[in-house]
Image (tube, rainbow, N blue to C red):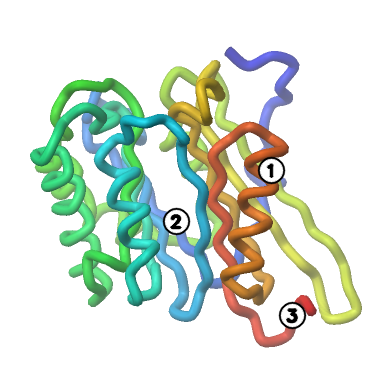
Amino acid sequence: MAVNFPTLDPKSLTPIPGLALGIAEAGIKRANRKDVLVMRLTPGSTVAGVFTQNRFCAAPVQLCKQHLLEANPIEALIVNTGNANAGTGEEGLRRAFQTCEVLARSFGLSAEQVLPFSTGVIMEQLPADKIVAVIPQAVAQLTEDNWFAAAQAIMTTDTLPKAASLTINTELGPIHLTGISKGAGMIQPNMATMLGFVGTNVRIDRGLLQELTAEAADTSLMQLRLMAIPQPMILLL
């Protein structure tokens, strides 16, 4: 439940050059609801992440950790609501990887270059067929100014979409940050099923980005994703 949370103005969310978002309705939990989000990152982007500290991790969490360790750079993300793909064993891993494979083919990538995220009901197998069926729809809608719809697409028990943007003007040009999150009463234990995604146009080393991501998560008690989109005119030293 949102407490003292202001109504979100879609126009207040700043697009991040090189980060496009696409939305689809797969009918995972119910019809006529945005429940699939695809993110496409420009080649050369830097991605870092922190994850729940719970002992039993859902299938997408396991795959995210594995793919971030691969040599292939991350260039796409896929998120679904309505089903968390948690407690689903090897079949859950297979279905999560299937969504990565199908999205990867849309962009000419390998499945290991895609990070999957799922949130919703636990102990039920992921309806991968429904997600796969609408991936073309989400890809067709990819735009850089889709942050408000993206915030809606990752909601579960949230009553309002959560998103924010920040611009910092520097001598080298403006630094933009835009992020979305979901989760109501899901911070504990150990970040539980929170999801957060933040994009920025700053060029940044992956090691430093990982440190900042961990620090932000430790401070805010939320799962956070930071994605740095390379822009030649902006360099943090």
Q: Which residue is mark 1?
A: 164
Q: Which residue is mark 3?
A: 234
Label 1, label 2: how far apart the Cα atoms are? 16 Å
Element type at marker 3? loop
* Amino acid type at mark 3: Ile
* Left or right: 104 in relation to 53: left
Q: Identify the mark nearer the N-term, 3 or 1.
A: 1
28 over 228 or under it: above or below: above
Residue 17, x across and y down, in percent: 59, 70
Q: Which residue is mark 2?
A: 21
Whether residue 42 is visible? yes
Residue 233, x across and y down, in percent: 73, 85
* Amino acid type at mark 2: Leu
Element type at marker 2? strand
Q: Identify the mark nearer the N-term, 1 or 2.
A: 2
Q: Identify the mark nearer the N-term, 3 or 2.
A: 2
